[in-house]
Amino acid sequence: MYVPSDFKVKDEATAYDIIKEHSFATLISGHDGIPFATHLPLMLNKENAYLYGHFARSNPQWKDIQNQTVLAIFHGPHCYISPSWYETNQAVPTWNYVTVHVYGEVELLQDENELMDSLHQMVLKYEATDSSYRLQDVEADLLSGMNKGVQGFKIKISKIEGKAKLSQNHSFQRQELVINQLEKIANTDEQQIASLMKANFKK
């Protein structure tokens, strides 16, 4: 990933936070000689050394992914930045965004207990704290049958790149103008980018 120094996420903990908060990722590998992508949730686990996930068995991507070095892209908030917000209109539009790229080698899960543990962790993450649903309450035969329809995997993380493009290459005055405009927009992404810009602004 192209990461100018102004936009580089230098703190590993920040990159891990982005992965956890925006865990629905794009997983890219080689399949039949061309890039192949699947969109799926990935769970950070084993003291941040692995990402866990699972494919539908009908998805051909898993069939030749073992031992491949793959790329998982975690998409954080993003939004359009209008030059009309600046102190001058002699500028061009841009886009602010946050993303993390994770590289690593894939190992297919053969141990059903390891697969079940990763599925339990995923349900715990996404179910509301007051939800009545628990995966362990599902009948064993039904769960076993459903597990046969998925292929679990883990990615041993070898490299993490984080990028936060938050107008750092503009003056503080212009950054403040952008923040003020973003805070007027009700959309979640604009609000999150404004918040991140303010946090970065204070550093």
Image: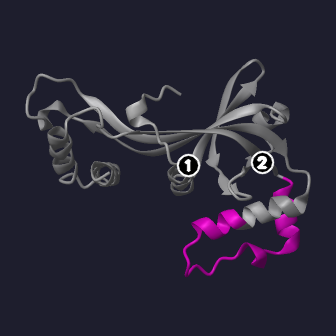
Secondary structure found at label 1: helix
Residue 178 falls inside the magenta stretch: no
Main secondary structure found in the magenta portion: helix
| Region of the chain picked out in magenta, as a range | 121-148
Q: How many discs mark residues in the rendered view? A: 2
Query: At which x and y percent is residue 42?
Result: 65, 51
Query: At which x and y percent is residue 106?
Result: 79, 40
Q: Earlier in the sequence, mark 1 or mark 2?
A: 1
Instruction: Tell me which residue sits at (28%, 32%) in the image.
Output: 169
Q: Callout 1, which amino acid?
A: Glu
The residue labelled by disc 1 is 12
Q: Is residue 30 above or below residue 156?
A: above
Q: Callout 2, which amino acid?
A: Lys
The residue labelled by disc 2 is 154
Instruction: Tell me which residue sits at (24%, 28%) in the image.
Output: 93
- Alpha-carbon neighbours of circle 1 within 10 Å: few (<14), some, or many (≥20)? few
Residue 138 quadrant: bottom right
Residue 125 falls inside the magenta stretch: yes
